[in-house]
Amino acid sequence: MALLPVLSIIGAVRTGSYMLHILSAGGFRRSICDQGFYIGPVSKFWAYAFVLSKAPELGDTAFVVLRKQKLLFLHWYHHITVLLYSWYSYKDMVAGGGWFMTMNYTVHALMYSYYAARAAGFLVPRPFAVVITSAQIAQMAMGLAVSGLVYRWMQQGDCPSRMDNITWATLMYLSYLLLFSNFFYQTYLRREAKAKSQ
């Protein structure tokens, strides 16, 4: 699992630079509808690596169990559904994938670096965990927005996707948004309120 932070950081840089190129050259709509992530000389490798990385990320769940730590529903549900959706969507080169990959690589670069630092024995300040969960919530909200825009622009014929894919993406991102928001509330807001009241 030590490779996950490195893979995520490099993936975030590579897909992020491609995303910035598309945004500056073609604008926001093109960045969502573009399929170049799947076929560009550099980005296609990182798109493929993204899909393959979902298997070792699911393996992260096994480490939680082996360490006898509490396994949250959010943890295993998120890893299983992301793996299934990524593998399901990759073959169709659906619109929105560039955003999904770039956001996920970026958030995972923060998250896995945080886990690696803690596993190495470093004391990481609590606000860093709050930032990571906030970034995850923002990712899920943006995922919903991208799915909605793909649906809207697909009707106009220039945003390649399928209705079943948009439906699964929307359900997945909505469930993640609710679960991560609940996690944020339970972990950071409710716990702090409870600690102040004691």
Image (spheres, rainbow, N blue to C red):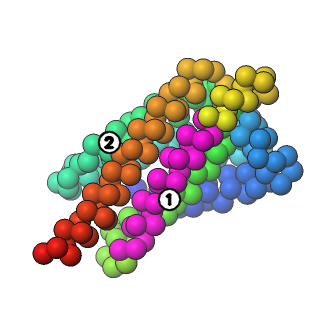
Relative image position of residue 124 (x, y in whole percent): 37, 76
Answer whether residue 145 is magenta in the image.
yes
Label 1 Cα crowd, 10 Å radius (few <14 / some 14-19 / many 20+) = some
What residue type is disc 1 on? Ala
Query: Is 84 or 141 nearer to us in this picture?
Result: 141
Question: Which amino acid type is marked by label 2?
Answer: Trp
Task: Give the percent coordinates (x, y) of residue 95.
Answer: 68, 33
Q: Give the residue displayed 57% in from the left and 25% down from the top.
A: 165
Residue sitting at x 53%, y 32%: 169
Mark closer to the chain start, 1 or 2: 2
Q: Residue at x 56, y 43 (%)?
A: 143
Side of 67 relative to 6 (left or right): left
Horizontal side of residue 113 vs 152, given as left or right: left
> Which label belongs to residue 76?
2
Q: Nearer the viewer, residue 83 or 1?
A: 83
Quadrant including the N terminus: bottom left
Which segment is the magenta one? 126-147
Q: Which disc, if any, is residue 135?
A: 1
Name the quadrant of the C terminus. Answer: bottom left
- Which image quadrant is residue 93 in? top right
